Amino acid sequence: MSLKHTLLALLSEGGGHGYELKSRFEEALGPLWPLREAQIYNNLRILERDGLVALEQVVEQDDAPDRKEYGLTPAGETVLADWLGTPVATNTKLKDDFYLKLSVLARVLHDEARLADLLWLQRTHYLQHVRELERTLQEAEMQDDAVTAALVEGAILHTEADLAWLDRCEQRLLSSSPANGGGQL
């Protein structure tokens, strides 16, 4: 996710300072995307440097650092509109730690036993993840939060696809699999 674009969207609703933007972010995305306050401030500095937001005012505070309020610039509006109107590219590069582990075990070490263990551990991880997502989905549905429910449902479907892919990996890569015909790694 592009935090800078989300900040631009939040500022398009009206100016704000870092803590306020963090609160609005959490209200919009809730448990789906944990965020540290430092991430907000770092991104605001970058957006200001790039001319996408502008410092509108500084409010002095007695017991805290001065509060800087930002607003969206016309350039920021353009970048936001472009981002919202562009489809998200799928990643065709398999640069994932699990893919690397699978490749090392199958092609470098030729260690079928450890590969089988890795597939089992990954399956266990995915199943736990689906259970957590299902709880989050139930909470979103109980709160009539259709956006969170739709996003969590998408995450569940992705994880279920990963589980199906693990089944196919076992069939293709493990010699004990009937689909593999007893072949070797």
Image (cartoon, rainbow, N blue to C red):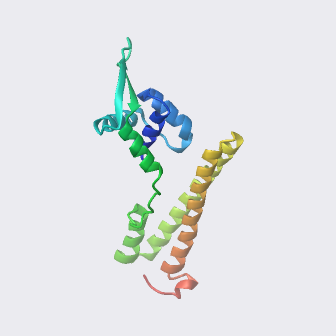
Residue pushed farthest top? 62
**170 left or right of 47?**
right
In the rendered image, residue 164, in percent from the top left (x then y), is placed at 58, 69
Quadrant for residue 168, please give it: bottom right
Q: Residue 82, position in %: x, y?
A: 42, 49
Q: What residue is at 55 percent from the left and 38 percent from the top?
A: 28
Residue 120, how many percent across, how many down? Answer: 53, 66
Instruction: Determine the residue positioned at 39% across, 45% down.
Output: 79
- Closer-to-camera residue (183/84): 84
**Residue 76 lies in what quarter of the image?**
top left
Of the 4 image quadrants, the one containing the C terminus is bottom left
Q: Is residue 181 above or below residue 170?
A: below
The structure residue drawn at horizontal position 43% and vertical position 39%, both measured from the top left corner, is 8
- Percent across and percent down for residue 2 are 42, 47
Instruction: Decide which of 48, 62 is in the foreground and name it.
Output: 48
Residue 27 lies left or right of residue 84; in this view the side is right
Whether 80 is drawn above or below 10: the answer is below
Does residue 37 appear to the left or right of 32 in the view shown?
Answer: left
Extreme right residue here?
142
